[in-house]
Image (cartoon, rainbow, N blue to C red):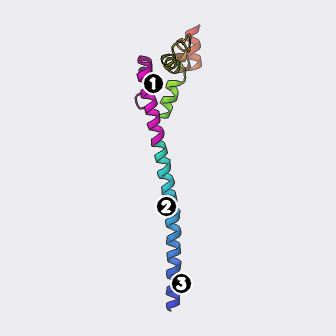
Amino acid sequence: MSEAVAILSLSASAVVEDVLRQHGCRLSDRDLASRRAEEAAGRRNEAAGWLRRTVGAVAARDLPEEPSEEEFRLGLRNGQILCGALNRVHPGAVPKASAPCVRYLSRSFPAAVATVS
């Protein structure tokens, strides 16, 4: 009978170790992914703050202080903020930074055609 208890005890401890190892890895992977997302958000917020300070009103209007990944991408999409920052860092680097035609991109095609006709 003691052999059966010993085998059962050994099997139970092996199962517990396997479960802990599996769940422990998953938790640490989640923690790592969460940490990486927080670090990316911190770098994005730092970059947005620098761009807002460097470019000024244009960046403040188009780029939130703490943008999501999508807001950051949309804010930089037209290139106006990046051209402004480049001209501040190296004056004359972008000879002509004109206003973009992004307002037409946000509307549907039929609505845009209706305003042109």
Q: Residue at x 41, y 18 (%)?
A: 56
Which amino acid, mark 1? Leu
Name the magenta segment's main secondary structure. helix
Q: Which residue position is annotated with label 2?
A: 24
Instruction: Name the quadrant containing residue 94.
Output: top right
* Viewer can see residue 56: yes
Residue labelled with disc 1: 51
N-term-proximal mark, 2 vs 3: 3
Q: Position of residue 76 (x, y in %)?
A: 52, 24
Q: Which residue is mark 3?
A: 7
Q: Secondary structure at mark 1?
A: helix
> Residue 97 placed where, x, y %?
54, 13
Q: Is residue 63 visible?
A: no
Residue range of the region highlighted in magenta in the rendering: 38-67
Would you identify the image quadrant in which residue 57 lies? top left
Front label number (1 vs 2)? 1
User: Does dot 2 land on a helix, a strand or a loop?
Assistant: helix
